[in-house]
Image (spheres, rainbow, N blue to C red):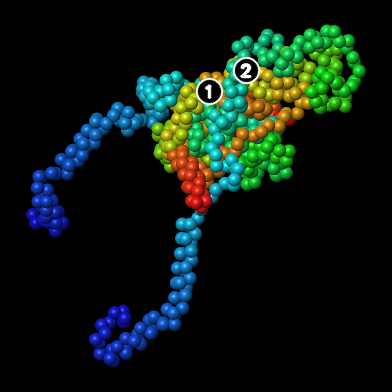
């Protein structure tokens, strides 16, 4: 049977290849060696690095693997910040959806909440990251983001011509940030809190572009957190120290609220403008507010359906 | 193309080439391009110079914009918070009117009132107070109200409602609720006022008077904590340290310069 020209060419090429690999290294041998080398490198490196390389997404971890992960994190943080670290992975409670309400008629814009949040959630001190941004707005203009000023700094607040709108993560029911994440590193928990797996985040910042509230913050530099200011009460999806190149956001103080406590911003607010509770419980403070007060959400036209409500309590 | 033609070509061809050159590239047009190119080059050069020589934006002198404040800078604010976070151990009382509240915020040493008022005959006269209690600024419907509308005339260690029934200082919300009914209703259900403790358990309520001075109840103005660092002044910690080092270096340099000038 006569050989077609194509076969002729292939044969010639194969012949050439064979001639040019003097040790007779075939493609199969090459790939096998490569694979073995990779496995060897992985086997040779430290257990922490190996764990980091082979780590699974947080939601795919089995309970035993979660325990191992917590133990590893505990060892890491104990080494960096001292021994009295407690890190939990407490899951969402049954029959609980968290809601938040903020009384704009009370808020005086004192920014106590901003710094209480930083203290509780181990944000980087320098470069500075703050999850709550208090916007000063003119009473004559109403809610107007275009003229809002987050950098106000008078001697005393409240200013009689202004009112103040603190904005943090609105914990949307239909969050856009989780939709756009290309790796699924952020998602909504059954209790409604939108969380981030800091180990899975690749730092693409799509979520920051998608968030209409500017609630997500990126670690542009290596986070700097003095050991003395470290809050050792940690949750794996919440306030544990982040690394450079990951996005972070408000989690309603997941480490506190899943233990039944109020978020830190609620507890610091000197005027009691911040209210928090279970939306499903009809007797909770938040349910009463939704029932008895006229509440609104920011940018309702976007259909993000926040669980963070604003109201005028007077 | 005609320009690349070798020079040793016959004259006739050279002449043809010259004509072709004129037709393809007009000398007049290429002359016009030169000033344009010069202008473009100058503009680009100017932009590059401006970018290279531009000084970094520095916040105005005394502005807090470039300092990254943290909670550790305000120990007073946050120390107070720590002390008050401990939730009331006692659960809500059996009666719906009794709420676990901390002790009323008396001026130190002023309670019990009867330790002084024991020997003083009560004077129901409406007057400007002198000596004791002159520090009280009364700004609470002062046209219509007077001390004894709330304080009991005969037993100063307690208050009294409009109907005369006594109320201890620890339940003063009942007194306030007589006029401020909607606020009292909201306070009972947790909508008005500060709550600390557990969202699903023991909460600590505060008395009205913990936040509102009963004698002038408008919430006092506060100094705000500093604003966030503007994005253009954000820098990683290492850069901040380096910058502070640079500053100290320049200061040393200036001193040297001054010394040299003096010499």
Residue lying farthest front? B263
- Residue lying at 89% horizontally and 21% vertically, measured from the top left: B127
The quarter holding residue B188 reads top right
The quarter holding residue B65 reads top right
Q: Are marks 2 and 1 in contact (CB under 8 Å)?
A: no
The chain carrying label 2 is B
- Residue lying at 26% horizontally and 85% vertically, measured from the top left: B7
Question: Relative to B47, is B146 above or below?
Answer: above
Which residue in the protein does label 1 denote? A256
Image quadrant occupied by the C terminus of chain A: top right
Question: Relative to B96, is A22 above or below?
Answer: below
- Residue lying at 87% horizontally and 23% vertically, measured from the top left: B128
- Residue lying at 70% horizontally and 44% vertically, measured from the top left: A141
The chain carrying label 1 is A
Question: Relative to B226, is B86 above or below?
Answer: above
Would you call the spot at circle 1 few (<14 residues within 10 Å), some (14-19), or many (20 or more)?
A: some
The x, y position of residue A92, in whole percent, is 49, 23
Answer with left or right where residue B250 lies relative to residue B163. Answer: left
Which is more toward the observer, B255 or B125? B255
Q: Is residue B151 visible?
A: yes
């Amino acid at each position: 049977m006569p050989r077609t020209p194509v076969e002729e060419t292939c044969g010639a090429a194969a012949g050439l290849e064979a001639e040019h690999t003097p040790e007779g290294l075939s493609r199969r041998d090459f790939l096998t060696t490569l694979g073995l080398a990779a496995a060897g490198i992985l086997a040779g490196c430290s257990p922490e690095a190996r764990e980091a390389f082979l780590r699974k997404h947080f939601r795919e971890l089995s309970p035993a693997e979660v325990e191992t992960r917590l133990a590893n994190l505990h060892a890491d943080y104990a080494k960096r910040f001292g021994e009295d670290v407690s890190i939990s992975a407490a899951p969402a409670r049954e029959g609980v959806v968290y809601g938040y309400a903020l009384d704009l008629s009370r808020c005086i814009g004192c920014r106590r909440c901003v710094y209480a949040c930083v203290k509780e959630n181990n944000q980087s001190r320098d470069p500075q990251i703050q999850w709550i941004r208090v916007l000063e707005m003119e009473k004559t203009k109403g809610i107007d983001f275009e003229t809002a000023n987050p950098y106000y700094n008078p001697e005393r607040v409240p200013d009689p011509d202004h009112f103040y709108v603190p904005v943090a993560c609105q914990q949307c029911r239909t969050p856009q940030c989780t939709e756009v994440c290309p790796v699924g590193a952020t998602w909504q928990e059954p209790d409604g809190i939108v969380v981030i797996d800091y180990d899975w985040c690749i730092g693409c910042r799509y979520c920051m572009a998608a968030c209409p509230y500017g609630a997500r913050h990126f670690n542009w530099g290596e986070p700097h957190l003095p050991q003395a200011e470290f809050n050792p009460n940690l949750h794996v999806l919440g306030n544990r120290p982040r690394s450079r190149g990951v996005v972070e956001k408000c989690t309603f103080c997941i480490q506190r609220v899943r233990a039944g406590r109020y978020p830190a911003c609620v507890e610091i607010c000197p005027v009691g403008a911040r209210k928090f509770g279970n939306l499903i419980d009809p007797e909770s403070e938040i349910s009463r507010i939704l029932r008895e007060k006229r509440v609104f959400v920011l940018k309702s036209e976007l259909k993000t359906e926040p669980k963070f409500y604003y109201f005028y309590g007077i | 193309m005609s320009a690349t033609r070798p020079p040793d070509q016959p004259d006739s061809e050279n002449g043809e080439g010259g004509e072709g050159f004129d037709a393809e590239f007009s000398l007049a047009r290429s002359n016009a391009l030169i000033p344009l190119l010069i202008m473009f080059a100058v503009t680009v050069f100017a932009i590059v110079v401006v970018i290279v020589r531009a000084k970094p934006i520095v916040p105005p002198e005394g502005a807090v914009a470039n300092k990254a404040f943290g909670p550790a800078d305000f120990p007073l604010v946050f120390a107070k918070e720590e002390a008050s976070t401990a939730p009331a151990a006692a659960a809500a009382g059996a009666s719906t009117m009794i709420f676990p509240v901390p002790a009323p915020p008396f001026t130190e040493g002023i309670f019990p009132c009867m330790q002084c008022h024991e020997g003083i005959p009560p004077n129901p006269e409406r007057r400007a107070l002198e000596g004791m209690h002159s520090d009280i600024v009364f700004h609470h419907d002062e046209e219509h109200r007077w001390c004894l509308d709330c304080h009991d005339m005969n037993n100063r260690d307690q208050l009294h409602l409009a109907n005369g029934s006594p109320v201890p200082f620890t339940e003063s919300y009942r007194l306030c609720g007589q006029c401020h009914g909607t606020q009292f209703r909201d306070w009972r259900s947790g909508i008005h006022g500060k709550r600390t403790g557990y969202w699903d358990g023991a909460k600590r309520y505060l008395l009205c008077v913990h936040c509102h001075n009963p004698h002038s109840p408008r919430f006092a103005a506060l100094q705000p904590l500093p604003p966030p660092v503007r994005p253009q002044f954000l820098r990683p910690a290492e850069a901040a340290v380096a910058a502070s080092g640079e500053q100290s270096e320049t200061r040393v340099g200036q001193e040297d310069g001054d010394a040299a000038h003096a010499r």
